[in-house]
Amino acid sequence: MKNAVLITIGDEILSGSTVDTNSNFIAAELKNIGIKVIQIFTISDQIETIKKTISSAFELGDIIITTGGLGPTRDDKTKKAIAEFFNDEIALDEETFAHLKAYMERRGRIEILERNREQAFVPTKSKVFQNHNGTAPCMMMEENGKLLFSLPGVPYEVKPLIKDQIVPYLKDKFSLHYLSTRIVSIVGIPESILADKIENWELALPENLSLSYLPVGTRVKLRLTASGEDDSILQQQLEEEIQKLLPLVKDHVIATSQDKIEKILADILTDRKLTLSTAESCTGGELAKMITSVSGSSNYFLGGIVSYATEKKIDILKVKKETVEEFTVVSEQVAAEMAEGCQKLFNTDISLSTTGVAGPRKGEDGKEVGTVFYTIRIKDQEVTSKLYMPHLDRLDFMHFVSQKVIQDLVALLVNN
């Protein structure tokens, strides 16, 4: 198996002003072709730092991929550091310049071609992968059978370069084993107890299979990975092991294939031809966002409302004013009435509601930050639950609650 090292270059990543999403994407794409990422570096845009990190990366891995640090100026530090590391020179590449010119013409920006001309200068020993979504090309250097790819940092440029050019190149260059993965989602059991229950099964796994525990909120994803030369045999092997696992945890399994909880929900709703709507307050639309992130969600999700103000809960969702006055807006009773009103408003089989305090200050009714009530209403049956998570910041709180609501809905549907 080939190993890879990723290097993210840029002070904006180190300062926290930009989130590194590239590494996550690249690692996942490499995993799919049997290449394991064993180290990720995040470094500043300084020539000596880049050179030292590349040197360390070559000692660790077979494939090094850098992202970021490729600008439109002649003194670009990443490009210069790579040239110096490989004892190379930087020169104009006519093919890259022609590609850059055509790219500018298609976008009606030919007047700035000269300003971006420097991006067509590359190390003379490099193999260039042309960037069809930006001006900085990807450059590949090879030494002693090891490869270094240098990519721009913009995610919408990185993704097609990796998927459409680099991954196919690596598959052709190396004889790579297939790497197949299945996810078994477990709820309602702590990770430590789960580990005890399946210990004997885990110890008996074949050598080419590995197991990872991936906690997501209150769900545990068991990721089972198989490597080998024949993908169909691997798929059969994974299925056989999952069938051995299921009797050990049958009351807690909500899915045996899909990874994300919103996709698990999508499969269930589509299969059962059920419709869904949402009424949100403290989650601010995050619940609807997760649900609609799945392609085809329009087949089962009819709509949602963010009834942030109390009067909108009363006016639109028909929450009783007396209920709010007696129990406060963040309460089990209001969550239940929100769900019922939402179900009637959108005429759906299922409705979900959330009301709580995301922070950073207490709610208008004095409820503590981190308090939330949520209701799941299926037909004429409803379940209302409470969470208290004062340790989460506002955005993490909104995402966690949304995950938990969908997870609870899936569990209810699976067990009924």
Image: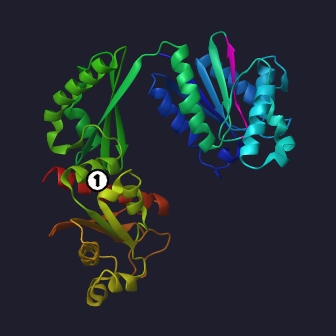
Residue, disc 1:
407
Q: What amino acid is at disc 1?
A: Gln
Look at the image and tell me in which quarter the C terminus lies.
bottom left
Task: Please state which of residues 342 and 368 is positioned toward the viewer in this rendering.
Answer: 342
Task: Please state which of residues 113 and 208 is positioned toward the viewer in this rendering.
Answer: 113
Q: In which quarter of the image is residue 161?
A: top right
Q: Position of residue 187 (x, y in %)?
A: 25, 47
Can residue 288 be seen in this snapshot? yes
Q: Magenta segment: does it hold 42?
A: no
Q: Quadrant of residue 123?
A: top right
Q: Position of 159 compared to 82: left or right?
A: left
Q: Magenta segment: does it hold 141?
A: yes
Q: Give the range drawn in magenta.
A: 135-143
Q: Position of residue 113 (x, y in %)?
A: 83, 42
Q: Which residue is drawn at 17% across and 27% down?
A: 244
Colour mapping: rainbow
The secondary structure that most of the magenta stretch takes on is strand
Q: Where is residue 379 in the image (x, y as percent from the top left)?
A: 16, 67
